């Protein structure tokens, strides 16, 4: 029984760590720390590491769900603002 619990904990840690890396790299790509009220990629990564799928859901809702009026998707250099 202890082996099953240990295996579950290890798998859970690996999944949380992978999600945290993915959120960190996406937040860095989106330049989330550009405004004073937004938190940076490092804090998003730490929140995801601790909060798991709930933190990923909050991150997605804020940055990718379309509720933002200013889209932060990266543009190619020299392209006009829309």
Image (tube, rainbow, N blue to C red):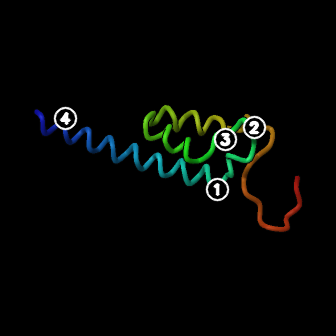
Mark 4 or mark 2: whose residue is earlier in sequence: 4
Q: Residue furthest left?
A: 1
Residue at point 60%, 39% (across, down): 60
Taking depth in this image into account, of 22 and 45 the one nearest to the observer is: 45
Mark 1 or mark 3: whose residue is earlier in sequence: 1
Q: Which residue is mark 4?
A: 5
Numbered disc 3: secondary structure: helix
Q: Quadrant of residue 11?
A: top left
Which label number is shown at residue 69?
Answer: none
Label 3 Cα neighbours within 10 Å, binned few <14 / some 14-19 / many ≥20: some
- Residue 56 location, x and y as percent? 52, 38
Residue at point 55%, 41% (across, down): 43
Judge depth for marks 2 and 1 and give the one in front.
Answer: 1
Taking depth in this image into account, of 46 and 5 the one nearest to the observer is: 46
Mark 2–mark 3 CB contact (< 8 Å): yes
Q: Which residue is mark 2?
A: 68
How far is mark 4 from mark 2, CA to CA?
Answer: 41 Å
Numbered disc 2: secondary structure: loop
Figure check: 78 above or below 5: below
How far is mark 1 from mark 3, CA to CA?
Answer: 12 Å
């Amino acid at each position: 029984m202890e082996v099953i619990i240990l295996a579950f904990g290890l798998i859970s840690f690996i999944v949380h760590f992978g999600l945290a890396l993915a959120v960190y790299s996406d937040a860095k790509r989106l330049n989330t720390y550009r405004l004073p009220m937004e938190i940076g990629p490092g804090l998003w990564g730490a929140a995801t590491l601790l909060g798991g799928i709930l933190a990923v859901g909050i991150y997605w809702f804020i940055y990718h769900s379309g509720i933002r009026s200013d889209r932060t998707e990266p543009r190619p250099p020299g392209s006009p603002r829309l």
